[in-house]
Image (cartoon, helix red, strand yellow):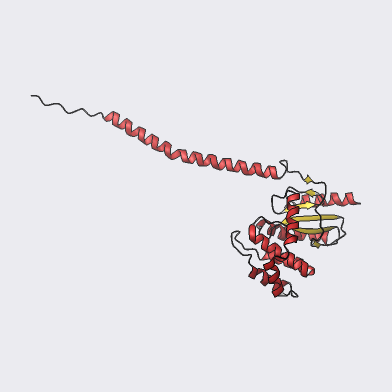
Amino acid sequence: MAKKSPPQRRPHAKKAKNATKSANKSANNVRPLIWISLAVIGLLVLVVAINQFLQGQDGQPVQYREAPSLEGQPVLGNGNAPVTVVEFGDYKCPSCKIWEERILPRLKEDYIDKGKVRFAFINVLFHGEESKLASLAAETVFAKHADAFWTYHHALFEAQASSHDSRWVTKERLVELAERHVPDMNLEMFKEELDRETALPAVETDMALVDKFQVELTPSVMINNVMLPDPFDYEAIQAMIEQQLEAAK
């Protein structure tokens, strides 16, 4: 009986199958990269869209029917100055610290010190409990030693940690800053005021203004009743101040 011949191999078919597997594997490797790229592009488009929405899409100033009330607010400069500049800021906000260091000194030299502008700071609590605690400390200093408020205000920004995620706002740190920058402060009383959140009504007044003027970013800067799209554009700040000064004549 003749032996059954072994089945013939089909090398070309095997090679084709391996090639197909290789191609599928390459395609599978490429697909995640494509989806990641599309996701990144989509995220960038979303960020741009949000920024445009928050800034009025065309980057134009937003005019409100009235300016923020400064009743009970700390004011830097001549209380009767014809133009008011308000910063909505957060002591935990890195951009607010930059604004404090780069824009406010120029504003002070050009307008506040000359009696043309009065400046006020409105607390925003976008960074949770630390923002709230720092605001309570600043408002407590203002209530007890109003003449030392701006010194303490500047000290809070100077004390801001280099890392945004660092938990640097503690009661101990706030008391230490009060001891260094508010010499007449009763530190025991200051601690008690922080524990009891005595200054909370003042902070809540600020948050009501944040809601009223639809503040979504910090810092946000208003000149009289006009919200500027870019708080770091000093030329635009100057132009708006000059326009408001001219209107006040």
Height in image: 231 above or below 178? above
Q: Using the rendered view, name the quadrant where residue 99 is placed.
A: bottom right
**Which of the pair 93/233 is nearer the observer?**
93
Is residue 242 left or right of 9 when viewed as pictured? right
Taking the view exactly as shown, the residue that stands out farthest to the left is: 1
Height in image: 34 above or below 3? below
Residue 113 position within the rendered picture, expressed as x and y whole percent measured from the top left: 83, 62
Residue 233 position within the rendered picture, expressed as x and y whole percent measured from the top left: 74, 51
Asked whether residue 103 is in view, the answer is no
**Which of the pair 133/59 is nearer the observer?**
133
Q: At 60% across and 43% down in the image, what residue appears?
A: 44
Asked whether residue 100 is in view, the answer is yes
Q: At 59% across and 59% down in the image, what residue appears?
A: 165
Taking the view exactly as shown, the residue that stands out farthest to the top is: 1
Callout count: 0
Residue 70 position within the rendered picture, expressed as x and y whole percent measured from the top left: 81, 57
Is residue 15 left or right of 2 when viewed as pictured? right
Taking the view exactly as shown, the residue that stands out farthest to the right is: 249
**Which of the pair 156/241 is nearer the observer?**
156
Residue 48 position within the rendered picture, expressed as x and y whole percent measured from the top left: 64, 43
Q: At 65% across and 58% down in the image, what residue appears?
A: 94
Q: At 51% across and 42% down in the image, what residue appears?
A: 36
Quadrant the N terminus occupies: top left
Q: Using the rendered view, name the quadrant where residue 106 is placed.
A: bottom right
